[in-house]
Structure formats: C-alpha cells, structure tokens
Image: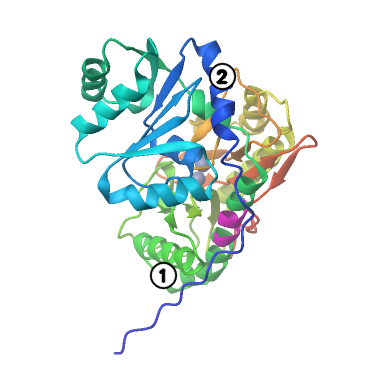
Amino acid sequence: MSPVPVRVSRPPDLPPLDVAARLDRLRASLGAAGVPGLLVTHRPNVRYLTGFTGSAGMLLVPTDADAVLVTDGRYAEQATGQVREAGVPAEIEVAATQVDQHRLLAGAAHGLGRLGLEAHAVTWAVQRALSERLAPVEIVPTEGLVEALRRVKDAGEVARIRAACAVADEALAEVLPVLAERPTEAELALALEVAMRRRGASGPSFETIVASGPNGSRPHARPSDRVVGPAELVVIDFGCVVDGYCSDCTRTVSVGDPGDDARRFHRVVLEAQRAGREAVRAGAECAAIDRAARSVIEAAGLGEAFPHSTGHGLGLEVHEAPRLASTSRDTVAAGSVVTVEPGVYLPGTGGVRIEDTVAVTDEGAEPLTASPKDLVL
Ligand code: ZN
Ligand code: ZN
C-alpha cells in the first residue's frame, strides 16, 4: 500500500495581535500589587507580553525601564525576530546556563528593591535560586497579574479563537460519520485530531475525550480501546490550537436511538446549556451563569449528577480566568471568551455534556462553536 499524502491547509489570514500595548497595561497594575517590577516566568504570559513563543524565556518588566527578555542560545534568533515583529520595546539577553541567566536578571533588577514573582508558575527550587541570585532585591509572590489582562481579548485574539472553533467544527463534521463504522474511542479521537491538524491547527488544545456508553459517566475519561456501540451515548470533548489560541467544544451523540432515559438526559442538558448561554453578557456574575444552567438540571432531579462548574475562560490556555462556578465572585466582561458546558453523569449508564465556546458581548454571548447539537446521528 502506498502512503497516503496528507495535505495540511493553512489557517485563514488572521488580523494582527495588539501585543505592543500590553507591557504598559501590566506596568499600570504593578503599583497596586506593591511591586516596582515583575518577573514573568509563565510561558503563556511571556508569549502574551512579547510575542515570543519559545519554550525557554523569562521576562523582567520593571515599571520604569525597558523590559528584558532572557533566553538561551537556541532561541536567540527567534526571540529577536518575534519581539521585533510584535513591535514590543524589550531588550533580548541570551545566556546558555541558568546561572548566567539569573546573573543577567540580577543586573536588570538591580535597584528595584522588590520584585514580584508569579507564585503559581515557579517551583520552590527556582524561587530559592532567584532569591539567592537576585539578593538584595526582595522576591515577593504575586497572583494572576498578567492573567487579569488576558481575561479581555483583543480583536486579533478573538479572531484566532474563532478560527480554532471553526477548525474543530469542520473536523467533527468530517469525522462523525466514522462512528457508524464502530471505531474504538481512541480511533475516533485520533481521527478528530488528524482532521483538526489537516485544517491548520497546530495540535489539540487538550487531550481529546471520546467516552462511550458507561465510560461517559466520568467527565474526564480518556479514550480507550472500547468499541463505540450503536444506540449509546458518546461524549466527544475536543478542541484545537490555531496560532496559539484554543477552542473547546463538547457534543454528545448516538448512532441510533439511545432510549428514553438517554434522550431525556440530553434534553435536560441541552436546555441547561441554552439557559447558561442566555445568562452570559458583559457584567453578568459568573455564579449567576452557573446557577442558570444548574437550576435546569436540578429541576429535572439530576442536580447531584452535575459535579463540575459550568464553564471557564480560554485563550492562550484552554483553562483561564474566569471560572463560571457557583463559588465564583467574578463577573464576565465584554471581550472575555468563556465556555458553557453543563453535563450529567450517571455511573453505570453514561453521560451527557454539551459545551460551546462563546464570546462575551454587551448584548449577550456570541457562540464561536457551531456544531449541531442533535443527539441521534
Ligand atoms: Zn471541553
Ligand atoms: Zn471546557
């Protein structure tokens, strides 16, 4: 058998990202955080602020001086090119070893007095090494400073998420007919990931979930060797990355009628998902969105079968602020992109989850995922 050529289409032309404005927005928030500078180590945050996509780099952002991006020799050329292309005023410093990189950071941080470190993104070991190397600058923990900026997307970011959603929608439409040929869960997941990559995605935005029959009762089931049978619920949760930005979508389908109970579960979740989406608009409380979806499921007597929160923000990462959860005190803002994804899970029986990625506007929620929500194929 001759190898089948795999063609990869280019993603659509995308509008530019407004990277250059972001450093000053971060600087404006440092005063309130009580630090005259921040060392950004979380990679998606480094990318967000500079356009640099390499796997090794730390960005020092003083309030009163140019930012300094420290990386190693593998990325010298790439970092220079990407930062310049993004129009970001940052110096690039290159050093082979971590010790030398810390020395460069110590020079750039000299005189700051205090320096914020992203508490959720450094190991104990790195924090200790930096404390030693940067002394007498005091290292202090900060929480979510760059993430707070990332909550509201610019037009270029929304366009990328929209493109990732469209790629995922097209891939699902291509792959769903394969279900009739009784693939295993793992085979269907692979077909979906290949279909997304062939449309220009750089990869899945998380490990694709295909959970059939009783496997569907676990919200984060991994695809197994189980053959997907007819007339059973199949939860497919999938997404991809286009130019750094994620999509996230879940559909629950069945090849043939899965029976009265399954159809009722699907109807309830569909109604809950619609209620959740309708509660999304700029300024809405995250807890109220969760309540809107959850109350539909509770009214159907299935409240205990819905053990997770209703949704999450997404962008450069598939899980970002805000969380659409009952315990959240957050609100959603115009320009945020969030998921709405209620589900019910019944051990021994299976599960139903329906998820869209939506853009938050002043009027409501604009769906970015558009795959049909029909249960029976
Ligand atoms: Zn999902
Ligand atoms: Zn999700």
Quarter of the image that includes the N terminus: bottom left
Q: Nearer the viewer, residue 220 or 242?
A: 242
Residue wearing tag 1: 182
The three-letter amino acid code for the residue at tag 2 is: Ser
Residue 56 left/right relative to 291: left
Q: Residue at x 19, y 30 (%)?
A: 99
Q: Position of residue 357 (x, y in %)?
A: 61, 45
Taking the view exactly as shown, the residue that stands out farthest to the right is 363
Q: Position of residue 16 (x, y in %)?
A: 61, 51
Q: Residue at x 61, y 21 (%)?
A: 330
Residue wearing tag 2: 29
Quarter of the image that includes the C terminus: bottom right
Tell me the SS state at disc 1: loop
* The residue at label 2 has a CB less than 8 Å from ligand 2: no
Residue 228 left/right relative to 374: left
Tell me the SS state at disc 2: helix
Q: Residue at x 21, y 21 (%)?
A: 129
Crowding at mark 1 (Cα within 10 Å: few <14, some 14-19, many 20+): some
Q: Nearer the viewer, residue 57 or 45?
A: 57
